[in-house]
Amino acid sequence: MGRSNAWTSEVDWTTGQWQERRQTPPHRGWRPPTPRGVLAKRPLTFFEVLDSGFRLLRFDPGLTIGSALIVFSLWTLALTAVGTFLVLRFFPVLSEIVADDEAMSGFLLLVQAGSFALSLLSLGVVHLLAGLTAPGVEDSYLARRTSLSASWRRLRGRRLPLVSATVLMSAVNAGLLVLLALPALAFSLVESFALAVVCAVVAFLLWAAALVWLNVRFAFTGVVIATEGLGVRPALLRSWRLTRHGFWRTFGQLALGYFLSNQLVQLVITPFLVILMGVFSVLLATSESETALTVLGIVGAGIVLLLSTVASAVLFAYFSCLVCACCFDRQVRTEGFDLALIRRSEEETR
């Protein structure tokens, strides 16, 4: 073959002979780098997962807070209707309780315990909110915002399993409470009030522990229904497998995130409630008309209900984003989901 050098020739390593150098591939030109998403395409640290909820709230408030406002407005209306029915149904009994100071103190304690139990029962709604938010959280890895209507359209064919999973988990949470409360109810019927109180306390602690354990193991049910199109039973099994080895990490992230966000919401909303109570106290003290007092009471109750609904919506919007971030982080750590995200972002920039 003529004169050969390293500039014009190369070695064919199958034959050991020199041959003409192949043409270099054409230059493809400059391409923009893959977009940097809201969440990093890698395993997140413990506190990065906690911060991811706030990042997602700031990045896409229309989807995260908007969906939570809609869901909790309906939830609050349902609870208000039930509460109004109970007050009207047992109004004579409530009047007797209010007239007795000891009965009133016990009733207030019971109301506080019921409020705490109701907040734990509200955890079932997180599955629905996480499913509504999951498409937007997945798009946030690619720095794309998703509207609430677009997320709802992408859930076509998955809405019924998502609602069914929410109803199922809420029913399981409530059924556990009723089942564990039966011994305390039985002792109260035979007038063994001391044993009834002891059984009620033990039952409540057992219910809270079982509730936390079950809701952590099945925390990703709504997310996998929304992103993978699974049915209710396969989604429950999928969530169970994802939390098998990272249970304590997931529990710590969800528990600490719920506690911190709850304290933050209470810190923000408490000054408004204090100012509102002060204003209404002055108005009630200076008003003499019974009609005006009734109107002020209704307006005050409405404002408090509105503030509590907004606070609950913001709290559970953050918590649903946190559940989605924990789910995708578990997939990154155990299934290489970050590689799929990187490949998807590279395909979109071609």
Image (spheres, helix red, strand yellow):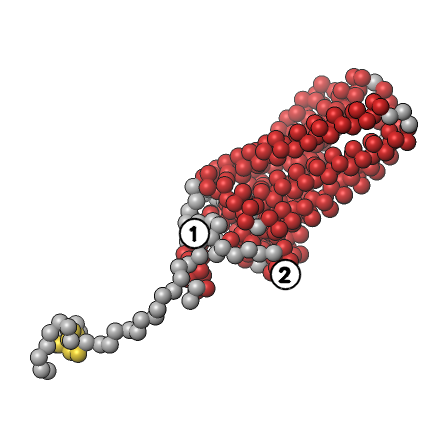
Looking at numbered disc 1 in the image, what kind of residue is underneath it? Lys
Instruction: Tell me if label 2 and label 1 are in contact, CB under 8 Å.
Output: no
Whether residue 165 is visible, yes or no, is no
**Residue shown at the point (78%, 37%) measured from the top left:** 302
**Residue shown at the point (62%, 51%) measured from the top left:** 62
Q: Quadrant of residue 255?
A: top right
Quarter of the picture containing the C terminus is bottom left
Counting residues from the start of the chain, the first of labels 2 and 1 encountered is 1
Classify mark 1: helix, strand or loop: loop
User: In the shown orientation, is residue 138 left or right of residue 76?
Assistant: left
344, 311: nearer the viewer: 311
260, 119: nearer the viewer: 260
- The residue that label 1 is drawn on is 41
Quarter of the picture containing the N terminus is bottom left
Whether residue 23 is visible, yes or no, is yes
| Location of residue 250 in the rendering, given as x and y in whole percent from the top left corner | 50, 40
81, 63: nearer the viewer: 63
Gap between marks 2 and 1, in whole Å?
A: 26 Å
Classify mark 2: helix, strand or loop: helix
- The residue that label 2 is drawn on is 153
**Residue shown at the point (70%, 27%) measured from the top left:** 274
Report crowding for label 2: few under 14, some 14 to 19, many 20 or more residues within 10 A (C-alpha): few
12, 158: nearer the viewer: 12
Looking at the image, residue 74 lies above or below residue 143: above
| Location of residue 310 in the rendering, given as x and y in whole percent from the top left corner | 68, 40
User: In the shown orientation, is residue 92 left or right of residue 344?
Assistant: right
| Location of residue 18 in the rendering, given as x and y in whole percent from the top left corner | 13, 76
> Residue farthest to the left?
3
Looking at numbered disc 2 in the image, what kind of residue is underneath it? Arg
Report crowding for label 1: few under 14, some 14 to 19, many 20 or more residues within 10 A (C-alpha): some
Q: How many numbered discs, if any?
A: 2
